[in-house]
């Protein structure tokens, strides 16, 4: 098994992969926060690459790699905007679902059952944007994973990482409440010990010569009963980094 993958984690998610595109199923929480992740990403990408968001297929000049793409929740909205999207996942069941769903909706997305170690690396195969979404809290060595991802980014490219902060609040909300009280995600989805603080993530990226652009929290508003972007990074958060050359 490749170092960036965890066999138990892959087997756990493989049992749920049939439900990737069920809006009210096992991945319903991801479906709810996905529009916020995509908004955060697009706002930065459009500005960074000087793209007119109102053009037809505004992302047509960009190559995007989604590592740990699952069923393709982040890949599809990017592909709809013209991005050349490549999704990889060590879970072959998730890739089967992703391929079938993209075919059903008429999207041309390259999906492969691979981990980062098995991905071709050349100047031609590098990417403008890389997604590492809801992944690093499921691997044994986040710094090693990020180090292996680094060579695949083009100069002036961006990496987006989303994860869960590690503190008492995240233990109560993202683990105990989300899994056992509210059943937003299946029991056993997360290991609190693998949650990662934003400053620790920033430190990992700094060692790889990245600068931290910005971060936003993704929080649930119990009054309005909806998810929203926030400056509160205490639980779920998403960050953007740019390589320093």
Image (spheres, rainbow, N blue to C red):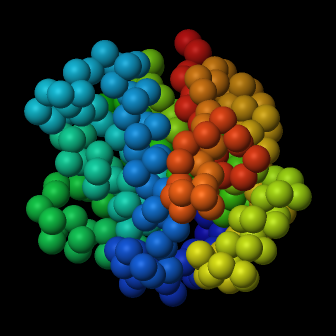
Tell me: residue 165, above or below residue 171.
above
- Using residue 48 as the reference point, say whether residue 167 is left or right of it: right
Q: Quadrant of the C terminus?
A: top right
Q: Quadrant of the N terminus?
A: bottom right
Tell me: residue 121, above or below residue 192.
above
Q: Residue furthest top?
A: 245
Task: Tell me which residue sits at (58%, 15%) in the image.
Answer: 244
Question: Considering depth in this image, is 204 or 21 the residue closer to the camera?
Answer: 21
Point out residue 178 in the picture as x, y percentages from the top left corner. Answer: 68, 72
- Using residue 38 as the reference point, say whether residue 193 is left or right of it: right
Q: Quadrant of residue 45?
A: top left
Q: Quadrant of residue 25?
A: bottom left
Point out residue 72 in the picture as x, y percentages from the top left corner. Answer: 36, 62
Point out residue 184 in the picture as x, y percentages from the top left corner. Answer: 59, 75
Task: Tell me which residue sits at (18%, 28%) in the image.
Answer: 54
- Using residue 6 as the reference point, say whether residue 112 is left or right of it: left
Question: Considering depth in this image, is 38 or 7 the residue closer to the camera?
Answer: 38
- Using residue 191 as the reference point, say whether residue 51 is left or right of it: left
Q: Count every numbered label the image shows and give the total.
A: 0
């Amino acid at each position: 098994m490749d170092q960036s993958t965890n066999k138990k984690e892959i087997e756990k998610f493989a049992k749920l992969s049939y439900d990737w595109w069920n809006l009210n199923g096992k991945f319903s929480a991801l479906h709810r926060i996905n529009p916020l992740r995509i908004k955060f990403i697009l706002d930065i990408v459009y500005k960074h690459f000087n793209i007119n968001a109102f053009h037809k297929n505004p992302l047509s000049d960009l190559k995007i790699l989604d590592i740990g793409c699952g069923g393709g929740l982040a890949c599809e909205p990017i592909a709809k905007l013209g991005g050349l999207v490549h999704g990889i996942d060590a879970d072959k069941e998730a890739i089967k679902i992703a391929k079938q769903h993209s075919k059903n909706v008429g999207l041309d997305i390259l999906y492969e059952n691979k981990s980062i170690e098995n991905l071709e690396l050349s100047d031609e195969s590098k990417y403008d944007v890389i997604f590492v979404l809801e992944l690093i809290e499921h691997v044994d060595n986040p710094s090693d994973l990020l180090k292996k991802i680094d060579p695949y980014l083009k100069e002036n490219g961006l990496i987006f990482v989303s994860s869960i902060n590690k503190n008492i609040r995240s233990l109560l909300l993202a683990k105990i409440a989300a899994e056992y009280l509210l059943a937003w995600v299946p029991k056993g989805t997360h290991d609190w010990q693998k949650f990662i603080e934003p400053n620790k993530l920033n430190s990992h990226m700094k060692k790889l010569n990245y600068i931290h652009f910005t971060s936003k929290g993704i929080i649930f508003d119990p009054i309005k009963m909806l998810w929203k972007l926030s400056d509160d990074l205490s639980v779920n958060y998403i960050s953007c980094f740019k390589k320093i050359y």
